[in-house]
Amino acid sequence: MPVSDSNRVVVEIDQELKRQLYATLALDRCTLKDWFRGAVERFLGEKADQVTAIRVPTATEKERATLL
């Protein structure tokens, strides 16, 4: 999946899995956005050493590279 500069993440999952996820989140009074952000933060915290070694260029850096 391509990485873009937008703030959106698009994921295709099975319809039944999606239904179960939303139902469970509703029971916890949690939004998908809040749940996802928490899951990402926990995941990145666990992988902190590996993630700091990986650096994705910003849009500005990409634009500079195009000008060169």
Image: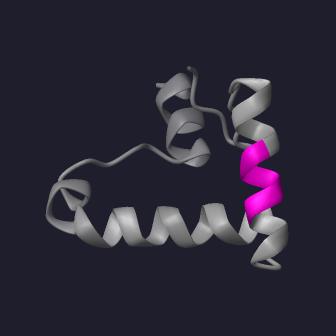
Q: Quadrant of residue 4?
A: top right
Q: Nearer the viewer, residue 56 or 15?
A: 15
52 vs 35, left or right, is left
- Residue lying at 76% horizontally and 65% vertically, measured from the top left: 25
- Which region shows up in magenta? 20-24
Tell me how many marks there are. Answer: 0
Q: Nearer the viewer, residue 55 or 43?
A: 43
| Image x and y of residue 38, in percent | 56, 72
Structure colour scheme: one colour
Quick check: can you spot residue 39? yes
Q: Quadrant of residue 46?
A: bottom left
Q: Is residue 27 above or below residue 32?
A: below
66 vs 34, left or right, is left
- Residue lying at 68% horizontally and 27% vertically, measured from the top left: 13
- Residue lying at 32% horizontally and 49% vertically, measured from the top left: 55
Q: Nearer the viewer, residue 7 or 45?
A: 45
Q: Is residue 49 above or below residue 5?
A: below
- Residue lying at 83% horizontally and 79% vertically, measured from the top left: 29
| Image x and y of residue 39, in percent | 51, 65
The answer to if 30 sits in the magenta stretch is no
| Image x and y of residue 60, in percent | 59, 47
The quarter of the rendered structure image containing the N terminus is top right
Q: Identify the main secondary structure in magenta.
A: helix
| Image x and y of residue 33, in percent | 75, 63
Q: Is residue 12 above or below residue 43?
A: above
44 vs 4, left or right, is left
